[in-house]
Image (spheres, rainbow, N blue to C red):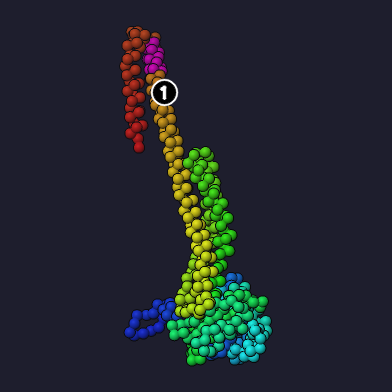
Amino acid sequence: MSDFALPAMSTTSNPFLPPDDDLRAILHNEVHVRPPARIRLPALVVYVAVLNHGVSRDQEHDHLRRLPGHEALEAWRLAGNFVRLALPDAVLKWERHSEFTRYTLVQPLPAAPLGQSTSPELTPHLMVPTGWLAGIPGRTIAAIELVMLTGDLHDAEAGLVRARDWLGERWVVASVLGNQHHSMVATDFRLRDGGFERMLVIAQPDTTETRAGRISQRLVELETYRLMALRGLPVAKALAPELAAAERQLADITAQLEGKAASDAQLLDTLVALAARVERATAEHAYRFAATRAYDTLVGQRIAELREHPIPGTQTIGEFMQRRLSPAMATVVATAQRLTSLSERVARTSDLLRTRVDIATEQQNQQLLEKLTRGQELQLRLQSTVEGLSIAAISYYMVSLLLYGGKALKGAGVPVNPEIAAGALIPLVLWAVWRTTRRIHARLHSTP
C-alpha cells in the first residue's frame, strides 16, 4: 500500500508581490507542523516510538481509526505527518518521521497508585483501548512513561526521594532544568518488565502548560535520538572484523605490487574483488553512519536546550550521555572514517597497478613497433628484389617477342637480322620497362 501524497498547494494572488513559489506555503509552515503539546500538571505522558520501515501510512491510519471517536478519521489528515486526536480526558499525538513514528499519549495522572506503593504500575490506567499500544504497526525503538508533578524545588533531596519511589531504584540521574530552575528531572535509563523506561519531572506550581509540553518533548526526543544514534554501533562492531581482513588483504596486495611477486592480471583480479567488497560495505552502511552522526548532533542539541544544573550527589543527563554515549559514537565515527580511508587506499593502489600495467603495455607496444619496422624494411628489400627480377623477366619476354617479330619479318623477305636487332634493342627495352614501373609507383603513391 502506498503512502498518501501531500496535497497540492496553489499559488496565492497578491497584488503587491510576484506569484508564490509552489513550495512557499509548505516551507513556511514547516515550523508549525509539530507544535509542542500543552500539558496540565500533574500528568502522565506515555510515549512510544516505532521503526516504520515497511509500515505504510495506510496501516498507521487504520490503527488510529481504532481509537474511540475517531472511526471516521480522514486519510488526508495524515498527509502532514502530524495529527493530534482528542480522547476522553486525554490527547494522543501521532508524528511520522523518516525512520520512525512517534505516538504520545497525554492524560491526567492517576493519583491513587502513586501513593500506594513503590514503583507503581500505571499501564492499566491508560485511557486507550486495551491492547491498542501493543497493536501499533512497527517495531518499538523507544517507550517511556513520564510522570509530571508539581512541587517545591528548594529541597532537592525530597525530590530525589519521590523519584526513587517512582523509579524503584537507588541510583538515578537527575538535574534541575532551566536558567530559572523551573523544574527537576530524574530517570535511571532502565527498561522495566513492561518494556517502558521511566522518567519523573517535578515542576514549579506556576509552570505553564506550554512549558510543561516543551519539557516533555525535549526529554522523549532526547531518548529517542539517543537510541536511534546507537543503531550504528552494532553495525560498526559487525563491520570491524571485515575491515580488518580487508586491510590485511590490501597490505598483501601492496607488498606483492612492490616486489613484483605476482602477475599484473592476478593482482588486478584480487584488487577488483577487494574494491567490490569495500564499495558494497560503503553502500550498505554509509546511510546508517551518517544518520548516527545526525542523531548524535540532535542529542547534543536537546541536552543543551535542557540547560541543566547539577544536584549534589547525582549525575546530570548531559554528564551521563557524555560518559555512556560518547564512546559508542566515537566507535561509529572511527569505523566510518576507517571505511572511507580503506576505500581511498584501494583507489590509490588501483592507480599504482594501473600505472604499472600502462608502462608494461607501452613497452610491449614499443617492441611490437620495432618488430613491425624491421619487417617493413625486409619487405621493402624483398620488394626491390622482386621488382628487379620482374623488370628482367618482363624485358626478357619483350626481347623474345621482338626476336620472334624479326624472324617473322625475315621469313617474309625483309632484309633484317633478327638476332642483331633484338640484341640492339635490349637496352631500350630495359629502360622502357623500368620507366613504366616507376610511373606505376608514382601513381600509386599519389593516390589518396
Q: In terms of image quadrants, where is residue 84?
A: bottom right
Point 46% across, 74% down: residue = 301
Q: Main secondary structure of the magenta part?
A: helix
Residue 17 position within the rendered picture, expressed as x and y whole percent measured from the top left? 34, 82
> Viewer-proximal residue, 383 or 20?
20
Point 60% across, 81% down: residue = 164
Residue 44 position within the rendered picture, expressed as x and y whole percent measured from the top left? 58, 86
SS at badge 1: helix
Residue 289 position within the rendered picture, expressed as x and y whole percent measured from the top left? 51, 64
Q: In terms of image quadrants, where is residue 426?
A: top left
Q: In terms of image quadrants, where is residue 191?
A: bottom right
In this picture, is 429 found above or below 251? above
Is residue 23 on the magenta stretch? no
Count of number-bearing discs: 1
Looking at the image, residue 59 sits to the left or right of residue 317; the answer is right
Callout 1 amino acid:
Leu
Quarter of the picture containing the C terminus is top left
In this picture, is 197 found above or below 379? below
Point 44% across, 33% down: residue = 368
Looking at the image, residue 381 sits to the left or right of residue 306; the answer is left
- The magenta stretch spans which residues? 391-407
> Viewer-proximal residue, 131 or 230?
230
Q: Would you name the residue on which mark 1 appears?
A: 382
